[in-house]
Image (tube, rainbow, N blue to C red):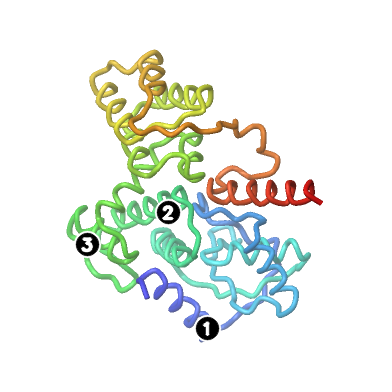
């Protein structure tokens, strides 16, 4: 079991040993800049059904704010489901935590989830890393010292079963504009080329996205490296971006290209491409099966 899952399990076990309070739902606030998406999907529907039948089995974890309200550390999805069901109160464990302790606990309580988007992991890692830097002394909830930035990356990597370089790559994604980061979440741009693109300026990234949108083509790793190099030399213009993006890639296979705008009403942004393709092919199979009858 990786460290994030261990921490989440420890938080749950500790919550069961502590006093559970019941507090009106209107007094709860989401964690500021919470990096994990809370949305209506298949997992949320299952959670809603579970709460409807059994209630909220695991209390939320929160801390009291200076204004007397409560900030959720763990349990954003449970709160969302409770609101959908019209519940007016939530079971909660209150913890005394500093801001940075709360950030670390919030991230660790969510990283055990089975499906996490690259953008969610990126901002979660960055939030935890920044909290560590401010503290200057912890690598986990057991107060082990952090002696350098290098060790901070290594500690974060070990806790989540990643290499130090992979953690660095994810944190680099936070430098991407939202439009490009959405393409990473949707598996249209792979992690490594996305990291190279993160070194482009905001203006250059916007020009790149405009080209991606108009040409319906995404950059390869080699193309991303080339754009990064030109950007560092001050030579990356809209024309050079277009020229790079319209070059035929080695071993390129002819594809049927469909703009996302044509099926955006069927799929939310960030839906994995493999999932979209599976549904489209299933629909085609059913369509032609009916025609044969």
> Which label sits on residue 137?
none
User: Which is nearer the eye, 86 or 266?
Assistant: 266
Residue at image mark 3: 146
Q: Is residue 292 left or right of residue 140?
A: right
Residue displayed at 78% across by 65% down: 86
N-terminal-most mark, 1 or 2: 1
N-terminal-most mark, 3 or 1: 1
Disc 2: CA contacts within 10 A as few (<14), some (14-19) or many (>=20):
many
| Quarter assignment of residue 78 | bottom right
Residue displayed at 63% across by 48% down: 281
Compute the Cα span from label 3 to label 2.
Answer: 21 Å
- Element marked by disc 3: loop
User: Which is nearer the eye, 123 or 256?
Assistant: 256
Q: Is residue 95 left or right of residue 89?
A: left
Compute the Cα span from label 3 to label 1.
Answer: 30 Å
- Element marked by disc 2: helix
User: Which is nearer the eye, 66 or 186?
Assistant: 186
User: How far across and down, in percent of the image, does residue 162 sit?
Assistant: 30, 60
Front label number (3 vs 1): 3
N-terminal-most mark, 3 or 2: 2
Residue at image mark 2: 121
> Which label sits on residue 18?
1
Residue displayed at 51% across by 53% down: 34
Compute the Cα span from label 1 to label 2.
Answer: 29 Å
247 to 19, vertically: above or below: above
- Element marked by disc 1: loop
67 to 212, vertically: above or below: below
């Amino acid at each position: 079991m990786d460290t994030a899952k261990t921490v989440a399990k420890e938080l749950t076990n500790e919550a069961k040993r502590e006093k559970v309070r019941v507090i009106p739902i209107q007094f709860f606030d989401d964690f500021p800049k919470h990096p994990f998406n809370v949305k209506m999907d298949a997992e949320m529907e299952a959670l809603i059904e579970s709460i409807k039948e059994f209630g909220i089995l695991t209390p939320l974890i929160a801390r009291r704010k200076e204004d007397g309200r409560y900030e959720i550390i763990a349990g954003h999805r449970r709160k969302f489901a409770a609101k959908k069901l019209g519940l007016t109160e939530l079971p909660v464990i209150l913890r005394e935590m500093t801001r940075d302790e709360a950030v670390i606990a919030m991230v660790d309580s969510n990283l055990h989830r089975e499906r996490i988007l690259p953008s969610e992991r990126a901002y979660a890692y960055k939030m935890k890393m920044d909290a560590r830097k401010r503290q200057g002394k912890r690598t986990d909830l057991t107060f082990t010292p952090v002696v350098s930035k290098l060790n901070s990356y290594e500690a974060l990597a070990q806790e989540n079963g990643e290499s130090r370089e992979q953690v660095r790559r994810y944190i680099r994604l936070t430098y991407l504009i939202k439009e490009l980061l959405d393409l990473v979440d949707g598996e249209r741009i792979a992690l490594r080329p996305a990291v190279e693109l993160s070194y482009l300026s905001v203006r250059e990234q916007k020009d790149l996205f405009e080209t991606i949108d108009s040409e319906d083509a995404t950059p390869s790793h080699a193309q991303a490296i080339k754009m990064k190099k030109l950007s560092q030399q001050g030579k990356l213009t809209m024309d050079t971006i277009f020229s790079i993006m319209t070059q035929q890639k080695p071993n390129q296979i002819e594809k049927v290209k469909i703009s996302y705008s044509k099926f955006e009403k069927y799929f939310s942004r960030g839906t994995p491409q493999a999932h979209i393709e599976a549904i489209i092919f299933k629909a085609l199979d059913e369509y032609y099966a009916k025609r044969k009858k």
